[in-house]
Image: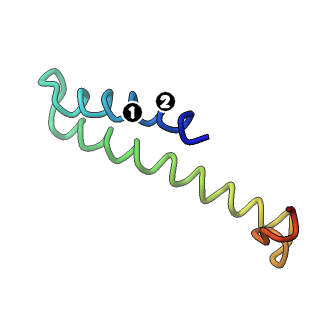
Amino acid sequence: MLTNIACVVIPCVLVFGRLLDTKLISQKRKAWVAFLVWVIPQTACFIWIALEYHYRGKNAALDYTLYV
């Protein structure tokens, strides 16, 4: 599991660094891109957790012992 995450995270960090180091786009556009790269996954995680609470209930959604 951790190697799968590393295989995705490392290339993403390298691409993100190249994007921020490029001189082809303005500073303002880089700031917006960096902001959106952070906001979109955070929003997706928030929606996913909200759906988990909605469909499984407040007591069972994050209860580890219930599903083991």
Quadrant in which the C terminus is drawn:
bottom right
The residue under the point 69% across, 55% down is: 48
Q: Are marks 2 and 1 in contact (CB under 8 Å)?
A: yes
Q: 67 or 12, which is in the foreground?
A: 67
Q: 33 or 59, which is in the foreground?
A: 59
- Going by the image, does 6 lie left or right of 34? right
Q: Which residue is mark 2?
A: 7
Amino acid under label 2? Cys
- Secondary structure beneath label 2: helix
The residue under the point 23% across, 27% down is: 18
The residue under the point 79% across, 72% down is: 63
Between marks 2 and 1, how big is the CA–CA gap?
6 Å
- Going by the image, does 32 lie left or right of 11? left
Q: Which residue is mark 1?
A: 10
Classify 27 as above or below 68.
Answer: above
Picture coordinates of residue 59, whole percent (x, y)? 83, 78
Amino acid under label 1? Ile
Classify 37 as above or below 48.
Answer: above
Q: Which mark is residue 68?
A: none
Picture coordinates of residue 21, whole percent (x, y)? 16, 30
Picture coordinates of residue 13, whole percent (x, y)? 34, 35
Q: Residue furthest left?
A: 23
Residue 65 occupies quadrant: bottom right
- Going by the image, does 40 lie left or right of 15? right
Classify 39 as above or below 57.
Answer: above
